[in-house]
Image (tube, rainbow, N blue to C red):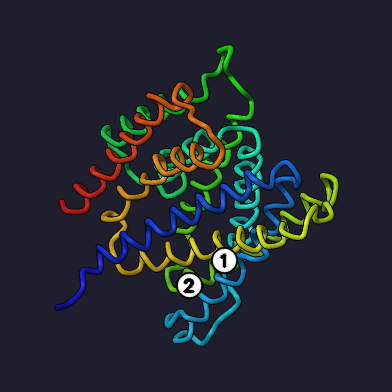
Amino acid sequence: MKPDRTFTAVLLLLCALTLFDAMGLIIKHLSPRYSAAELSAYRNTFGLIPSLIVLYSSSDWHAKGRIWRLRQWRLALARGAILTLAQFSFYLSLGLLTFATASTITYANSLFAVALATVLLREKVGWVRWGAVLLGFIGVIWIVRPGSDSFSPAALLPLGAAVCYALVGVTARVMDHDVPTPLINLYSSIVALMGAVILALFTGGFTPLDRASDIWWLVAMGGFGGTAVLLLIMSYRIAEQSNLAPFNYFGIPLAFLLGWVFFDESPWDELFPGALLILASGLLIVWRERRLKRA
């Protein structure tokens, strides 16, 4: 009996989200001793290993002569620079906010992706998806609470990261279709590594390792992040994105649970009902896109 590839893809996706959150936990754990730029540099350094594995295991890349040069190399470099800003903002927010709050706000990237697609890709977006975007923005504002006594400027960091992550995702669709995805990912990772190193040097340099065990934390951080990207690529290759998209939001309750278990955080007042609105808006966008595809 042929295995259900969609079920396999969902499992790969859930494993990827778990690894991304594990990476975030390590970043938050190390934040008191190392800057966000340093952590980003280490993450991209050790994350290159899984990226290279994905590239060399890509039959598409081998079939096309193992190309390294991209026609749109300037766009590839720009995507890496944007990814640098996204990582720096998100990693910095993990050291300043509760784990669940920082993680949840970044899930607004799907909302920004819809808005950016109308500008950059000239996609037509109907009132249902615009309504979903508006609902999601209300959820974000509810969490960030600008103008209130509880407002923290640090809450703008994961919001900025969400915009950058959305821009990285949307610009990937502008790249030539015959370019293997792992090669595009490798370009972004290398540029993000160089950008993180430059940021670290301009923000105080690299801190000597505080303890021997930290090297293993750094290796695990990069390995988790790089492997998560690998699993994401695998999952989206064997199943349609519309079938997987609803499961992306599994990361919101998972982040809350992990923050509670490892850091004794339970930011109910910060996250709810804003997180539910972000979740509802994302699922509404997924539902509408699936309806349009079937039509």
Q: Which residue is mark 1?
A: 72
Label 2 Cα crowd, 10 Å radius (few <14 / some 14-19 / many 20+): some
Q: Is residue 54 left or right of 79 when viewed as pictured?
A: left
Residue 213 image point, x, y percent = 72, 59
Where residue 80 sits, quadrant-wise, is bottom right
Residue type beneath disc 1: Gln
Task: State the residue at coordinates (41%, 40%).
Answer: 252
Residue 9 image point, x, y percent = 31, 64
Toward the viewer: 139 or 8? 8
Q: Is residue 58 above or below residue 214?
A: below
Residue type beneath disc 2: Val
Residue 15 image point, x, y percent = 41, 59
Number of dots carrying numbers: 2
Q: Mark 1 or mark 2: which comes first in sequence?
A: 1
Residue 179, which numbered label? 2
Task: State the residue at coordinates (82%, 44%).
Answer: 203
